[in-house]
Structures are given as C-alpha cells and as structure tokens.
C-alpha cells in the first residue's frame, strides 16, 4: 500500500511511514494512491461475513500485501471485540450504535485498531513512540483506553479546559502509566493547532519519535470504514436506497464513509449533520470554505471550527485541477454527494425529547443532531432508509441528558467507576513554546 500527501501527490510513502508519522512533512494528510473496488460478490453477500471478517477483507484489499494476511487477521481480532448494531426507530429511520466499546464512543474502533497496528510496526524499534492527540471529548478517552500500557508507546492527550464533560475528562486523566493529559487553556482548535505545529517542528522531530492518534492519521479512518459495511449488512437488501447521516466535527467519520463508498459500498447519499459549528454545511451551500473559531455547544465532540479531514474530502473529489483553490473545484461534485444541515442547542434538546417520547429511545446530543438532519433530508427524499450514527453513549453527557429528560440515566459500570478516581492533568497555557519545552523536558 502506498499513500501520498494531499498537498503533494508526488510525496509517496508506504503504510508504515504513514501510520507512524501521522502527518506528511508538508502538513498535508496521507491518502491511499489507490482505492480498490471490492468485489460485487463480497458486497452482495455481506450477510455471510462477520464484522471481523468484513474488517479483514477491507484491510486485505487496501493494504495490498503491506502486512501478511495472518497479521492483519490478528490485528482485527484484537481490535474489533464489540458489536455495531443497527436499531430501528421506524421503517425509514435507523440508529447505528457505535458506543459498545470500552470508552462508550465510536472512536474506540479507530483507537483500538490503531494501537494494534502501531504496536505491530513498533515491535523492533528501540526508541519509544510518543503519540500526540487533541480531543474535543471522545477521542481522548478512546485513545487512552486503546493504547493503555502498550509497550514502547507514550500517549499525550491535549484537551480544552472546561470544555469536555466530567466523565469524558475522567476517562483521559485517571489511567496514568503511559497516558498523560494536558489541560489546555483554550479551545479544541487550539489543542489541534499545538499538535500540528509540533509535527512540523524539526527540533522536536529530531529529538522525539512523534505520531498522531487523531483522525488526521489514516490508521483511524480505515477501521471506521468497517462499520459502514457492517451497518449496510444489517439492512434488508432490495429496499429503498440507504443514506448515512453523520454527526460531524472533524469529519473523520464521514470521510471514512466516503472511503467505503469509493470501495464499492452502494451508499446512496451522505448527510453531514453539525451543530452551530457549520463550516462544512455553509461550504456545501455556497462553495466558500471559511474556517473560524469553534463555538461551544451541547454536542461538544463536534465543536470544531476548522475540520482537519475537510482536506481529505476535497481530495476525494479530485481537486487537483485547481491546486490554488481546490475546495472550489471539488464543490460541484461534493454537494451532489453530501447534504449539510446545522442545528443549534435548542433544537438539539427538543430532538432528544422527541426521540424519547416518539420512539422510546434515548439518544445522545450528537445523535440528536443527526436525527434532526435525517428528518429534514427525508422531507424531500421520503423514499430512503436513513442510518444515523449514534457516536457516544448518552451517559457520557450525564448532567445535560438528565436535565433534558428529567430522569436518571443509567451509567454503565465501566464509566461510573471513574467518577471517584483522581484526575491527574498538567495545566497548560495555550502556548506552543510551553508545549515544546514540556515535551523536550519529559521525552
């Protein structure tokens, strides 16, 4: 498998380098030079394959001999140890539950797969690998759980102070061992900017082996494509076209769906559902991409004002003809494939109540934004079957969920047990100079 940088298609590396570096030196993002088309026989007979077998087939086609089949299978079997069930609200609306992993968020799929893949590539290295990850909520907990006590790997998680939920914070500040949290006085975008700057700093990279566990790393996106196949498998074949509605922040999840579609999964359409941080829906409407400072909302994991994976979305729509303004050249095709909607916190709260009252289903604020977007889309496209990605368990947003619904929310033991554990985090100003000095002093 070979990958190129979205900023320079002649900058080609192998899978190991792409995974272990995370970012190209030119600050682009790695993308496969070739996306294989999976056989029609495989697609038409998905029901005959287990979730793990689906993951194996996708990886085998993508990796193209970069890793022996038996090692791919071992990685998949250790990473995919929990299901991704589809729950039907009615004949048109369905929920893909992605919160059955250890940190109760969809990012468990990517984090656990990445931990196994990096562990595989890191076996013969003498120097520790230091993983930097910025989180707006769920990524940190998933990465902390996925990489916990992985030999030869240290994990540094940057999160915005006061802008993640109580239990989300506990997930990334209570493990210790090889997991360290930095509590940054800023926003998620500030955390992400610090991480990106570190990857481009030659002094740091000469001293420390750095990599990323954000969705900027291609190893996060590959396993996220698996559950699009798994969800499609669970729908009755031969019915109305299937659309996927994706609550979106950094747009890694939606990009993974686009990869699945490009590999042959017959997804009819994508819906990008955002909260007030509507940079991508605004782009889909106008063709103008205008990133801005993120706003804090009820669906905090989507509070992103400059989504990293937008560059991959543009790249998938073949923008090379207009390198100066690639987003302009991608716009016409992208807006045909993706419809964007944005909803504020008031609408989100009403949706949580509506789903509970109408369907007796408890949906988290991120899924509620997705529900609203699917509902809006199906007003104009009624003959579709929509799958909303429910990206996190409602109990991760306990205070808000109990306030909205006026009742207690059951918290799974693996999350509730964290509440009494002591938070350990390094207070950090929003300063690259501080961050660099801290890294050099500790690693």
Image: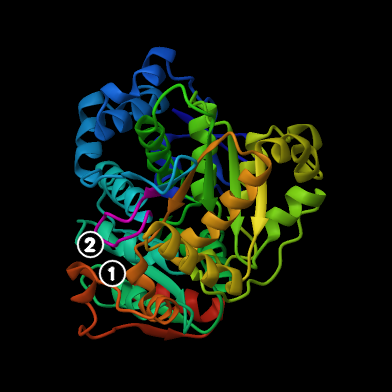
> Residue at coordinates 47% horizontally, 52% vertically from top-left?
215
How far from the left and from the top, in percent, is residue 391? Answer: 41, 56
> Residue at coordinates 44% horizontally, 14% vertically from top-left?
40
Callout 1 touching callout 2 (CB < 8 Å): yes
Q: Secondary structure at mark 1?
A: strand
How far from the left and from the top, in percent, is residue 380? Answer: 69, 42
Q: Nearer the viewer, residue 60 or 396?
A: 396
**Residue 198 colored in magenta in the image:** no
> With 133 as the anchor, is 189 left or right in this view?
right
Q: Please state the extent of the stretch shown in magenta in the rendering.
A: 96-106
Q: In this figure, which colouring scheme has been used for the structure?
A: rainbow
Q: Which image quarter: residue 102?
A: bottom left
Q: Quick one: quadrant of the N terminus?
A: top left
Ranked by sequence position, the earlier of labels 1 and 2 is 2
Q: Nearer the viewer, residue 97 or 177?
A: 97
> Residue at coordinates 31% horizontally, 44% vertically from top-left?
85
Give the class, few, some or many, for how many residues have Cα within 10 Å of label 1's Cα (few <14, many ≥20): many
How far from the left and from the top, in percent, is residue 301? Answer: 48, 66
Q: Secondary structure at mark 2?
A: loop
Residue 314: which disc? none
Residue carrying label 1: 179
């Amino acid at each position: 498998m070979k990958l190129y940088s979205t900023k320079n298609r002649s900058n080609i590396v192998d899978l190991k380098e792409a995974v272990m570096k995370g970012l190209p030196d030119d600050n682009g993002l790695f993308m496969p030079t070739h996306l294989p088309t999976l056989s029609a026989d495989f697609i038409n007979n998905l029901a005959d394959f287990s979730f793990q077998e689906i993951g194996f087939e996708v990886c085998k086609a993508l990796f193209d001999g970069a890793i022996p089949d038996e090692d791919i299978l071992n990685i998949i079997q250790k990473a995919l140890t929990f299901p991704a069930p589809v729950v039907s609200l009615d004949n048109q609306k369905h929920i893909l539950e992605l919160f059955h992993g250890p940190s109760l968020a969809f990012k468990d799929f990517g984090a656990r797969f990445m931990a196994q893949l990096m562990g595989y590539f890191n076996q013969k290295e003498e120097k520790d690998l230091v993983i930097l990850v910025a989180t707006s909520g769920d990524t940190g907990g998933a990465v902390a759980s996925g990489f916990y006590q992985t030999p030869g790997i240290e994990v540094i998680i940057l999160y915005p102070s006061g802008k993640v939920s109580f239990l989300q914070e506990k997930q990334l500040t209570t493990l210790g061992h090889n997991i360290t949290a930095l509590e940054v006085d800023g926003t998620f975008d500030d955390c992400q900017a610090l991480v990106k700057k570190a990857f481009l700093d030659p002094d740091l990279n000469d001293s420390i082996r750095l990599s990323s566990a954000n969705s900027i790393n291609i190893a996060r996106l590959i396993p996220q494509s698996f559950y699009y196949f798994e969800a499609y498998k669970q729908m009755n074949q031969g019915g109305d076209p299937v659309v996927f509605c994706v609550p979106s922040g950094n747009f890694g999840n939606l990009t993974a769906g686009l990869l699945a579609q490009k590999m042959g999964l017959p997804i009819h359409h994508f819906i990008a559902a955002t909260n007030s941080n509507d940079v991508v829906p605004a782009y889909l409407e106008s063709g103008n991409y205008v990133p801005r400072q993120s706003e804090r909302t009820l669906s905090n994991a989507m509070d992103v004002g400059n989504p990293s994976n937008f560059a991959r979305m543009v790249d998938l729509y073949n923008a090379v003809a207009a390198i100066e303004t690639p987003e302009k050249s991608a716009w016409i095709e992208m807006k045909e494939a993706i419809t964007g909607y944005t909803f504020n916190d008031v609408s989100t709260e009403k949706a949580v109540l509506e789903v509970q009252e109408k369907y007796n289903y408890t949906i988290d604020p991120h899924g509620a934004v997705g529900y609203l977007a699917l509902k809006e889309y199906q007003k104009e496209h009624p003959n579709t079957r929509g799958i909303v990605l429910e990206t996190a368990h409602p109990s991760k947003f306990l205070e808000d969920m109990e306030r909205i619904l006026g009742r207690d929310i059951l918290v799974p033991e693996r999350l509730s047990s964290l509440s009494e554990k002591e938070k350990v985090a390094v207070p950090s100003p929003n300063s690259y100079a501080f961050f660099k000095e801290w890294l050099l002093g500790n690693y």
